[in-house]
Amino acid sequence: MPETTGTSGASIELENLTKRYPGTPRPAVDNVTMEIKAGELVVFVGPSGCGKSTTLKMINRLIEPTGGRIRINGEDVTDRDPVKLRRKVGYAIQSAGLFPHMTVAQNIALVPKMIGWGKGRINDRVEELLDLVGLDPGEFHGRYPRGLSGGQQQRVGVARALAADPPVLLMDEPFGAVDPITRDHLQDELIRLQHELHKTIVFVTHDFDEAIKLGDRIAVLRERSHIAQFDTPEAILTNPADDFVSGFVGAGAALKRLNLTRVRDVEITDCPTVTVDDPVQEIFTRLRGSGTNEILLLDERGRPYKWLRRGDMMRAKGALARAGTLVSDTVTRDATLRDALEAVLTDNAGRVAVTGRRGEYTGVVDMETLMNSVHELLEADRLEAREHQHALEEIRAAQTHAEQEGA
C-alpha cells in the first residue's frame, strides 16, 4: 500500500455567520462566531431544527450565507467560486450518498478526476483509501453500492470525502442510518483515521454520547445555532454551562465519562487461541492445557469466530461446525470503555475480544478491568465534588468575614 502522506488540517473561522430564508421572521442561523483549530475534530450537537446542519453546510457553501465571513487557513472563502471550494472540502453525509451506477473505485475517484489527477495517481489513491478505511481493495474495487452493507457504504463515503486529500472534512450525521454495533465500529474507524491523518473535521450529530466519544471539542447549540457551550467533553460533562447544557448531559455524567477513555488506555490481556485450520485433536489438547474453561477460535483471517468450551466440544463430538458460541461483538483499541462494557454485558461472558483494523484478534478486555475503571471514574467524580464543595465553603466564609469586618 502507498504510504499515507498528505495534507493535514486547516483552521476554520466563522465570523457572525448568518442565514435568513425569505418569508421567515427570524434567521435560521444567527451571528455564529467560532474558531476551529487546524487538526481538531469539533462536533456540533443540538436539538432538531437548531441550525447545526445549516451552519455546517455554509462552511462549504452548499448553503449560501446571508451574512458574515468564513475563513479557512486565514483565507476568506465567502466570495470564492463555491464549486472550487467544495473540491477542497471533503463532505460525508448520512447513508453515504454514493452514486449507484458507479463502482466503489469510480465513486472514490470522482473528485480527483474532476481536478485533473492522472490515472495512475488516482488508482494508487483509491487503493490507499480503501485500505485506510478497512476495505480490501481487491475485494471492493469493482463492486457497486447495492452490493455493500450499510457500514461498508459509509466507509466508502468517507474514503470518497478524503479522496483529493482535503484539509477539511465536513460530516453531517454520517452514521445515523446504520445499526448501533456498526455505528460504534464506524466511530472507532473515524477516531483511528483522525489519529493518522490529522484533518480538521466538523461533525454534526443529535447524539450527545456520540459527541463525547468523537469530539476534541463540542459545540452545544441552541435554537438558531446560538452557542450554549463550546468546550472539551470533560469540561462539559463536569461543568455544564447552564440548564440547557445539563439537559444534554443528562443523568449519569460519571458513567458518560466512560466515553472519554479508550480500550487502548486499559490493560488488554491475552487468551488461548486456535484457528479453524488446526486439527480437532490439537484444539482439544490446547483447551485441556490452557488452564481455562474456554478457548477462542479464529477464522482463516485471524478474526474472532467462536468461543469454544470443554463441554461444547464434548457434546458436539469434536465437530467444530456444531461446537461453541459465535462471537457476537468485538471492539477495537479505539473503542471507548462504554463500548467495551456494553459488548461484555451483551455477550454475558465476562470478556470481549479486541481486534485490529482488519478485524484480526489482538487480545481481550475483561469485566474486572472495566469495573475497576468505572470505580476509578466514580471516585474521581466524588473527589472533584468534595473539592468543589470545599471551595464554595471557603468563599462563603471569606464573604461572611468581609461582611463582619465591614460592620
Image (tube, rainbow, N blue to C red):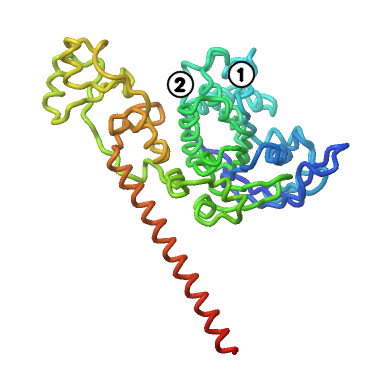
Residue that badge 1 annotates: 106
Q: Is residue 305 left or right of residue 284?
A: right
23, 297: nearer the viewer: 23
Q: Quadrant of residue 46?
A: top right
Which residue does the numbered mark 2 point to in the structure image? 136
Quarter containing the N terminus = top left
Please tell me which of labels 1 and 2 falls first in the chain. 1
Q: Is residue 202 above or below residue 309?
A: below
Q: Is residue 203 above or below residue 234?
A: above
387 is higher (above) or lower (below) than 55? below
In the image, what residue occupies the spot 14% across and 18% down?
284
Pinpoint residue 230: horizontal percent, then vertical percent: 61, 52
- 10 Å neighbourhood of mark 2: few (<14), some, or many (≥20)? some
State the image coordinates of residue 240 (x, y, percent, origin top left). 56, 54
Question: Residue 274, how many percent across, how many down?
Answer: 22, 22
Q: Which one is in front, 1 or 207?
A: 207
Callout 1–callout 2 Cβ contact below 8 Å: no
Q: Could you tell me the amino acid type at mark 2?
A: Asp
Q: Kindly tell me whether residue 121 is visible in this rendering.
A: no
Q: Report, in whole angstroms, how far the alpha carbon at label 1 lies from the one at label 2.
A: 16 Å
Residue at the image point whose x is 78% and y is 44% from the top = 78
